[in-house]
Amino acid sequence: MRFACGIIFLAVGLSFAGVDGPSELTFNDLNGVPHRPLDPGDRSASVLIFYWHDCPISNSYAPELNRIFASRTNFAFYIVQNDPQLSSLAAKEHARQFDLHIPVLLDPSHRLVKLARATVTPEAVVLGKNAQVLYCGRIDNLFVAIGKKRSTATEHDLLDALDDIAAGRSVRKPETKAIGCLIQ
């Protein structure tokens, strides 16, 4: 698994070879505000949460994602909706319904999905300076498998990774297996 993550990290880095740099990739959020999700700017890192509006596992994480977002203000957070059929209006309604506080970006052509090599929703990818992948995987271990959920999470992988990054340490567990809906 470590080898696979290393290959993913290398592939993400190489995928920027034809681009002026990660800061050049701009997406507007649902309010029309432009963001450069691959460039954390003056923050410690960018956190991309790949999300599918119809995925019950993604939707069950909305409150936890809001808590993480509110508690880790030194990171740039983005929810990346990747359903090609999702309109801006439907995405706004979804964000309102689930009270999402994190800026929502639409990725209908899967540009971010491909760059980050995301495969399921929800899946977190944390990118440092120069779009270096620092963490990829699950938010926590609440879901053991599709349809199999613990009563409470016992490991908080995304929070642990963010805490390591904020403390200037290497992420102790840079890759975990995310459980969720397949990105098509």
Image (tube, grey):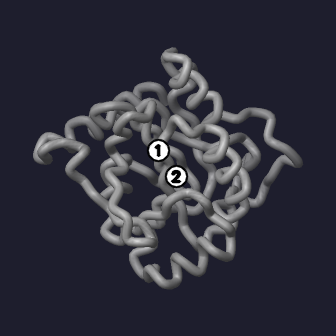
Residue 14: x %, y % from top left: 20, 37
Residue 27: x %, y % from top left: 32, 62
Q: Earlier in the sequence, mark 1 or mark 2?
A: 2
Query: Viewer-proximal residue, 80 or 42?
Result: 42
- In the image, taking residue 155 as reference, residue 18 lies left or right, namely left
Residue 79: x %, y % from top left: 51, 58
Look at the picture and state if 144 lies above or below 101. Answer: above
Q: Amino acid at mark 2?
A: Ile
- What SS does tag 2 mark? strand
The answer for how far apart the CA atoms under marks 1 and 2 are is 11 Å
Q: Which residue is painted at 57% across and 25% down in the image?
A: 173
**Quarter of the image where the C terminus is located:** bottom left
Q: Which residue is painted at 85% across and 44% down in the image?
A: 152
Query: Viewer-proximal residue, 130 or 73?
Result: 73
Which residue is identified by label 1? 76
Q: Which residue is painted at 57% across and 71% down in the image?
A: 53
Q: Residue furthest top?
A: 169
Q: Amino acid at mark 1?
A: Ala
Q: Which residue is painted at 24% across and 44% down in the image?
A: 22
Query: Viewer-proximal residue, 149 or 139?
Result: 139
Q: Which mark is residue 26?
A: none
The residue carrying pointer 2 sits among few (fewer than 14), some (14 to 19) or many (20 or more) residues within 10 Å by Cα, namely many
- In the image, taking residue 60 as reference, residue 41 lies left or right, namely left
Quadrant in which residue 39 is drawn:
top left
Quadrant in which residue 55 is drawn:
bottom right
Which residue is identified by label 2? 49
